[in-house]
Image (cartoon, rainbow, N blue to C red):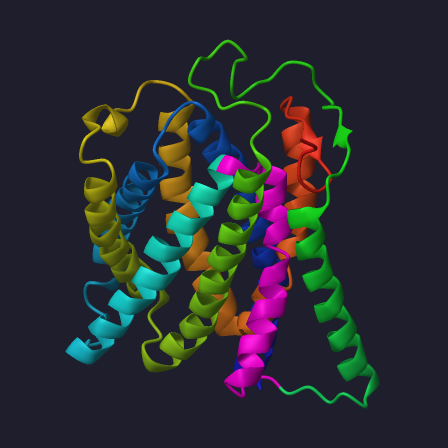
Amino acid sequence: MQIKGEERRMKKKAYGVAMVIQVIMASTVILSKAAFDRGLSPFVYIFYRLAAASLFLTPLAILLERRSAPPMSFRLLAKMFLYALLGNTVSLSLYNVSLKYTSAAVASAMSNSIPVITFFLSLLMRMEVIKLRSSSGMAKTAGITLCLAGALVIALYAGRSLSPLSRHRVLAGHGDKRQVSEHVSRGMWITGTFLMLLACVAWALWIIFQGMLLKEYPNKLLATLIQCLFGMIQSCVVAVVVERDRPSRWKLGLDVSLLAVVYSGIVGTGVCLYLQTWCVGMKGPVFLAMWNPLSLLLTVLCSSLLGETVHLGRQAF
C-alpha cells in the first residue's frame, strides 16, 4: 500500500514537471531565435548545445550512477544512437533551420501539432486506443482535427501583427547588421513552417521511443547522457560538413549567442531531456505531448515583453 501511495504521489508531481518543461522550452526557443538573428549558425549551435549538456550531465552521472548503473548491451547502445539521431540531430536541425526563417511564436504554435502526431503514432503502434462512437473518442477526433487545422492556418494564413508590449528590443538590437529582416519571403516562411512540422514528427517519434526505451533501460540519467553524447558527435559531423568553408561561424562572443548556448545546453537540453524522460516514464508519451500548447502562450507573452512583433499566422508579404 505504501509503495502504491508513493507511486501515486510521483504521478501527481508529473503535472508540475510538465509545466516546468514547457517554461524551459519557451525560454529556449526565444533565446535560440535571438542567437540566430545575430548570425549564429543553427548547426554549430546544436553541437555547442549538446556539448554543454554533455559536460553538465557527465559529472552528475559519474557521481550518482557509478555504482548502480545497470549493464548495457551493444544492441541497446545502437538503439540510443538511432534515438539520438532522431530526437537530437534530425529534430533539432530541422527545428532550428525553420526557426531562423519564421518566428519564436510560430515555432511554439507548430509544437501544438506534437500531441496530434504523438497520439496518431501511438495508435499505429497500438499504445493508445480510440473508440469513435464514445464521447471520449469523438472529443479526441475533434481535437486532432482542430490541431491539424491550426497548423495549416499558421503555414498559409497571412495574419495581422500584434504590437509588442515593450518598445525596447531586449535580445537583439535593431542596429545589428547580422540580424535578419523582420520580413522574409513567402516561400521561405512556408518552407520554414513545414520544416518545423517535420521536426515535430521527429520529436513525437522520439517521445514514443523514450517510453519504449525506459522499459528496457530504466536509468533515466544515463539514458539522457548517452543520447546527448551521441547527438553531440552526430551534430559535430553535420556542422563540419555544412560550415566547412566558414570557420568564423564557430566563434562565440560575449553576447546572446553564448547565453543561448549555455542556457539551452544545461537547462534546455540537459535538465529538460531528463525531465521529459522522467515524465514519459511516469505518465506516458501522450501525457507529455498534451502540455505543448502552454509553451505557445508563454512564448507569445515573453516575445512581446522582449520587444518582438508577434504575427497571427505567417507574415503579410
Kindly identify the residue that appears in the image at 51 percent across and 37 percent down: 101
Query: Which of 246 and 204 lies nearest the eye of the viewer?
Result: 246
Query: Which of 291 and 10 lies nearest the eye of the viewer?
Result: 291
* Count of numbered circles in the view: 0
Q: Main secondary structure of the magenta part?
A: helix
Query: Which of 77 and 108 lies nearest the eye of the viewer?
Result: 108
Q: Position of residue 181 (x, y in %)?
A: 54, 22
Kindly identify the residue that appears in the image at 66 percent across and 55 percent down: 151
Kindly identify the residue that appears in the image at 49 percent across and 52 percent down: 195
**Which quadrant holds residue 313?**
top right
**Which quadrant holds residue 264?**
top left
**193 inside magenta stretch:** no
Residue 63, visible in the rendered structure = no
The residue at the far right in this view is: 135
Residue 214, visible in the rendered structure = yes
Q: Is residue 137 left or right of residue 36?
A: right
Q: Quadrant of the C terminus?
A: top right
Q: Position of residue 198 (x, y in %)?
A: 49, 58
Q: Is residue 310 left or right of residue 278?
A: right
Q: Position of residue 217 (x, y in %)?
A: 32, 77
**Which quadrant holds residue 202?**
bottom left
**120 inside magenta stretch:** yes
The residue at the far left in this view is: 74
Q: Quadrant of the N terminus?
A: bottom right
Q: Position of residue 98 (x, y in %)?
A: 48, 44
Query: Which of 268 and 173 lies nearest the eye of the viewer?
Result: 173
Residue 234 vertical position relative to residue 253 in the rendered view, above or below = below
Q: Which residues are magenta?
A: 101-128
